């Protein structure tokens, strides 16, 4: 089993914790607020953006939104890139570590829920922490 604490980078940014393929809790970075001008359908400039992990990550979010819903391999490739990008911001991980942590295993009954949790965090929908440290509904 990987040692989550020992693999933390010096610029570790604590954020939402998710359970990964090794069964351990790993912290994904907290997004920052990133706003930009956006032209609406009426031609007027409005405010776009929101929680963000940076421009490169936003491009992956756009790719995911544009990906054909029937293209499971394409969607999964983008999701793996997104998850790997966030994990490697907080941890010094080799490719084999990413394989262990981000595995999708059809034989693992908890895998689907793990990936739901990962996707919630990656898309900025992680539960907010309460003052006592527990997650809000």
Image (cartoon, rainbow, N blue to C red):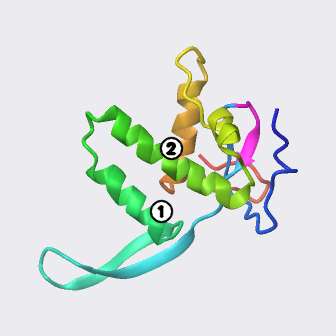
Distance from Cα at disc 2 to Cα at disc 1: 12 Å
From the viewer's side, name the closer residue of 20 and 100: 100
Q: Position of residue 106 (x, y in %)?
A: 52, 18
| Residue depicted at x 65% and y 52% | 87
Q: Position of residue 133 (x, y in %)?
A: 77, 53
> Which numbered disc flags the more N-terminal residue, 2 or 1?
1
Determine if residue 63 is in view: yes
Q: Judge left or right: residue 110 versus residue 112.
A: right
SS at mark 1 in the image: helix
Instruction: Give the crowd class for mark 1: few <14, some 14-19, many >=20 residues within 10 Å.
Output: some
Farthest residue, direction top: 107
Residue at point 47%, 53% (across, down): 123
> Residue at image x 82%, y 67%?
10
When asked about the image quadrant of residue 73, the answer is top left
Residue 41 in the magenta stretch? The answer is no
98 to 12, vertically: above or below: above
Q: Residue furthest front?
A: 95
Q: Is residue 85 left or right of residue 38?
A: right
Q: Which residues are magenta?
A: 22-26
Q: Main secondary structure of the magenta part?
A: loop
What residue does disc 1 label? 57
User: Mark 2 Cα within 10 Å, few/some/many (few <14, many 20+)?
Assistant: some
Residue 38 falls in image quadrant: bottom left
Left or right: 33 as drawn, with respect to 35 = right
Residue under numbered circle 2: 80
Q: Is residue 4 left or right of residue 109?
A: right
Residue for point 79% across, 61% down: 9
């Amino acid at each position: 089993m990987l040692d989550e604490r020992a693999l933390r980078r010096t610029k570790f940014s604590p954020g939402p914790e998710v359970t990964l393929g090794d069964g351990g809790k790993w912290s994904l970075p907290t997004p920052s607020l990133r706003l930009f001008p956006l032209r609406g359908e009426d031609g007027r400039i409005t405010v776009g953006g929101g929680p963000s992990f940076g421009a490169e990550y936003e491009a992956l979010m756009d790719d995911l939104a544009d990906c054909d819903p029937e293209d499971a391999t394409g969607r999964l490739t983008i999701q793996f890139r997104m998850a790997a990008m966030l994990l490697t911001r907080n941890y010094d991980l080799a490719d084999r570590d990413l394989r262990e942590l981000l595995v999708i295993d059809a034989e693992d009954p908890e895998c689907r829920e793990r990936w739901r949790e990962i996707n919630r965090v990656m898309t900025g929908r992680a539960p907010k922490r309460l003052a006592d440290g527990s997650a809000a509904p």
